[in-house]
Amino acid sequence: MSRILVLVGLAALLTGTPATAQDKALLTGAEWKVVKSEHAPPGTTLQFGADGKMLLTVQVDGKKQQMPGTYSLTGAQLVLKFTNNGRDITDARVVKKLTATSLVTEDRNSKLEELSR
């Protein structure tokens, strides 16, 4: 029984911890370029604003397509919301690593995505 309580407490701590100002400062500012991804095409970039807005830029058939949206960072949970071809998309990821030059996230299928500045 005590193991279950410890696991529940740990899960609540990991998912409910607000992101620090330093975490948000590391995320915002300069553009992030996708280095490794199973979903994003080569040349995809993300830019996060301090105001919770983001800009996703992808290259499809040699043409840049920009998709403005919003994001939230709560603890290690990064949630991206944007519209693509008339569809509202919400993408939740777990931040595995965040430094001034590296961002590694994991999607719900345990697939890692690496971005760099």
Image: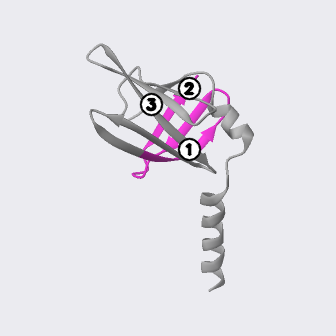
Is residue 49 covered in magenta?
no
Three-letter amino acid code at the position of disc 2: Ser
**Dot 2: element:** strand
Residue 72 has which mark? 1
Q: Could you tell me how far apart the alpha carbons at marks 1 and 2 are, in whole angstroms? A: 19 Å
**Color scheme of the displayed model:** one colour
Query: Which residue range is magenta in the image?
Result: 91-117
Residue 62 has which mark? none
In the image, 70 versus 21, the foreground residue is 70
Instruction: Name the quadrant of the C terminus.
Output: top right
For the residue carrying disc 3, how many other residues have a C-alpha within 10 Å: few (<14), some (14-19), or many (20+)? Answer: some
Label 3 with label 1: CB-CB less than 8 Å: no
Residue position for label 3: 36
Q: Could you tell me how far apart the alpha carbons at marks 3 and 1 are, in whole angstroms? A: 22 Å
Which label's residue is closer to the chain start, 3 or 1?
3
In the image, 23 versus 39, the foreground residue is 23
